[in-house]
Image (cartoon, grey):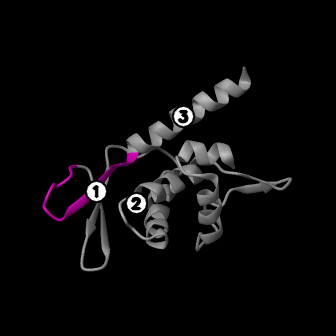
């Protein structure tokens, strides 16, 4: 669990809290011998949650939006899409686009493929070091 938290870039306690709060059965990993093992897709889901919550999106809203994005990554990495998060009157709007429209109401733009590739590269380094 601590390795996954490090790869995602959150404290282990934060990841444990998020795992307990996931409102659906997806992305909760596989439990073996009192340990939880997250797949790369699970880790990507939580990485998206991290990025959205850093921008001020509530955790549950972030999880619901991240679910669709991570589900789409089941077969392949995202292409050039970006997730635009816009602040509204007490809420957040989400839009996946290929060419970001930078307007005054654009709040954050998350490069989905870059996030996935960065996560995979960090995991490769960790597991290469463990193999040696």
- Picture coordinates of residue 84, whole percent (x, y): 28, 58
Q: Is residue 53 above or below residue 98?
A: below
Q: Residue at x 52, y 56 (%)?
A: 45
Q: Residue at x 61, y 57 (%)?
A: 15
CA gap, disc 3 and disc 1: 23 Å
**Residues under numbered marks 2 and 1 in contact, where contact means CB atoms less than 8 Å apart:** yes
Question: Which residue, given by chain and number where applicable, does mark 3 sit on?
Answer: 122
**Residues under numbered marks 3 and 1 in contact, where contact means CB atoms less than 8 Å apart:** no
Q: Residue at x 58, y 35 (%)?
A: 123
85 vs 76, nearest the viewer: 85
Which residues are the magenta region?
Answer: 99-112
Q: Is residue 55 above or below residue 6?
A: below
Q: Is residue 83 above or below residue 118?
A: below
Of callouts 2 and 1, the N-terminal one: 2
Q: Quadrant of the C terminus?
A: top right
In the image, taking residue 53 as reference, residue 101 lies left or right, namely left
**Is 41 inside the magenta-drawn segment?**
no
Question: Which residue, given by chain and number where applicable, does mark 1 sit on?
Answer: 108
CA gap, disc 2 and disc 3: 20 Å
Question: Which residue, given by chain and number where applicable, does mark 2 sit on?
Answer: 52
- Picture coordinates of residue 92, whole percent (x, y): 31, 72
- The quadrant where residue 30 appears: bottom right
In the image, taking residue 97 as reference, residue 53 lies left or right, namely right
Question: Which element type, helix, strand or loop, lies under badge 1?
Answer: strand
- Sort mark 3 into few (<14), some (14-19) or many (20+) by Cα contacts within 10 Å: some
Q: Residue at x 51, y 40 (%)?
A: 119
- Picture coordinates of residue 21, whole percent (x, y): 60, 71
Outermost residue, left direction? Answer: 104
- Sort mark 2 into few (<14), some (14-19) or many (20+) by Cα contacts within 10 Å: many
Of callouts 3 and 1, the N-terminal one: 1
Question: Which element type, helix, strand or loop, lies under badge 3?
Answer: helix
Outermost residue, bottom direction? Answer: 89
């Amino acid at each position: 669990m601590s390795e996954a938290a490090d790869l995602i870039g959150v404290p282990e306690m934060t990841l444990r809290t998020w795992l307990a709060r996931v409102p659906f059965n997806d992305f909760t990993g596989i439990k073996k011998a009192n340990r939880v093992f997250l797949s790369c897709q699970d880790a990507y889901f939580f990485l998206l949650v991290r990025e959205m919550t850093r921008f001020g999106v509530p955790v549950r809203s972030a999880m619901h939006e991240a679910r669709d994005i991570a589900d789409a990554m089941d077969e392949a990495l995202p292409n050039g899409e970006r997730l635009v998060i816009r602040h509204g009157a007490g809420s957040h709007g989400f839009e996946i686009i290929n060419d970001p429209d930078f307007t005054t109401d654009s709040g954050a733009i998350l490069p989905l493929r870059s996030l996935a590739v960065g996560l995979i590269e960090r995991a490769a380094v960790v597991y290469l070091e463990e193999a040696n």
